[in-house]
Image: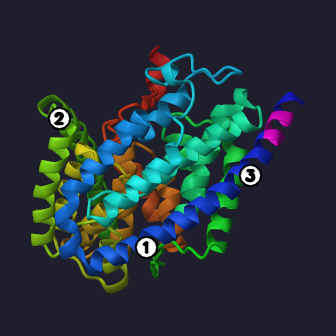
Amino acid sequence: MAVMKKTILCSLIAAVIGAVMGVISGVFGCAIEFITEIREEYYLYLTPFLGAAGIVVIFLYKKFSPYSQQGLDLAIEYQMGGVDEKGVVKDFGHARKIGKFPKGYAVLKIFNNLIMLLFGASTGKEGTIAQCGAAVGDYASRIFKSRKYSQILLISGVSAALGGLFQTPLGGLFFALEFAASGVLFYEAVIPALISAYASCFISKLCGYSAFSFAVGLEGGLEPLQTAMLVIGAAAFGLIGRGFAELLGKARELYKKRVKDPYIGIFAVGCVMAAALIFLHGGRYSGAGENIIYGIFADGEFYIYDFALKLVFTVICVSVGYTGGEMTPLIAIGAAAGAALAQVSGLPFGLSAAAGAAAVYGAATNTLLAPIFIGIELFGGDTALYIALSCVIAFAVNGNRSIYSSQRHIIRSFYSVLKK
């Protein structure tokens, strides 16, 4: 009875979280589309101020909420800690020092993300909305006096955030269950998180927001040689995702070590990035990368080096403080890598791009089920078998690397458990 009571209570609160996040995701998604249209039309006038925009972003974080710059790592620290009735986190790093999410966290993250994307930073959007979901879940646990269930409600918030912004409720569910610790799922949160994800997806559509998705058709299965090429490509996707995570970690460490004044650092790097972004195909690599994704799946247009340049720009921008998320850029990087693979291997173009999009994202975030479901929901059921195959192989070769430095690495091998 106690378990059923907890599930029912958390599910009811999760439905409220889903409704709130549906509105936030829908409005935020529409705002991103509006901002993107403005940037693409006036990129020559806006991109040169990327360095100045960086100063504004750093100032707002330091002035109003220093912890907010931590991104999803803050949510991981909070989720993995033990929370008592008063909301005090007992374990794991800086989370226990703050006890609850910073005030104004969600508003500040959204505002800063819009500034960064308006002026051309090569960063995503889903990190911001996932962090808002975590904050809303935390707020809900306090409002409804359910602090002992705060971890479940935090997961429900993240699930609702991604379910609403990408309109992939199953993908949002499994990402929320997986992202904090590789190798374990938080089964207690499955039902509430599922309810919140579907509620958010439904509400975000009512708000007039429509996320990108492309139905990739595939008549019949792949030939044995094509399947072998996909397996090799999947391993390459895994290495790209792993390389992204490692480069991002090293770039952050190097930047923190070498740059003492964050204002000077982000201004200088922002100015250099602005010049490079304008020079290389007129802002093609600015923003989250949806223009690259649309170009590949809608028109079959891409450059063979798209994935490499988008990777480099995103790593640099995120490492110096233009934090907004990596998921959409990773999908763009993976889709471009898949398109390049199709060009040299003879694999069906759409299938290869879809498999690359899901597998690179999964490898970089060190998640398995989330990218499979996100890939299927974005690109259609015809690709399901091959997306799953690609994600499994990419996950196997990523070496337990992750873009989330706070992610717990639980033992993933049953053989290793037996040896204990």
Closest to the observer, 244 or 75: 75
Picture layout, residue 274 above or below residue 61? below
Disc assigned to residue 16: 3
Indicate the amino acid at tag 1: Glu
Which residue carries the number 1 mark?
33
Which percent across, then down, holds residue 10?
Answer: 76, 40
Q: Quadrant of residue 314?
A: bottom left
Q: Secondary structure at mark 1?
A: helix
Circle nearer the N terminus (1, 2): 1
With 363 as the anchor, is 155 left or right in this view? Answer: right
Q: Magenta residues, as a range?
A: 4-9
Name the residue located 65 percent from the left edge and 39 percent from the top edge.
139
Query: What's the magenta bit mostly, secondary-structure-wise?
Result: helix
Q: Secondary structure at mark 2?
A: loop
Between tags 2 and 3, which lies in front?
Answer: 2
Can residue 416 be found in the magenta stretch?
A: no
Crowd rating for badge 2 (residues with CA inside 10 Å; few <14, some 14–19, many 20+): few
Circle nearer the N terminus (1, 3): 3
Name the residue located 51 percent from the left edge and 24 percent from the top edge.
98
With 95 as the anchor, is 26 left or right in this view? Answer: right
Picture layout, residue 284 above or below residue 86? below
Can residue 6 be found in the magenta stretch?
A: yes
Crowd rating for badge 3 (residues with CA inside 10 Å; few <14, some 14–19, many 20+): some
Which residue carries the number 2 mark?
261
Crowd rating for badge 1 (residues with CA inside 10 Å; few <14, some 14–19, many 20+): some
Indicate the amino acid at tag 3: Val
Quote the CA–CA distance across marks 1 and 3.
Answer: 26 Å
Which percent across, then down, holds residue 221?
Answer: 44, 74
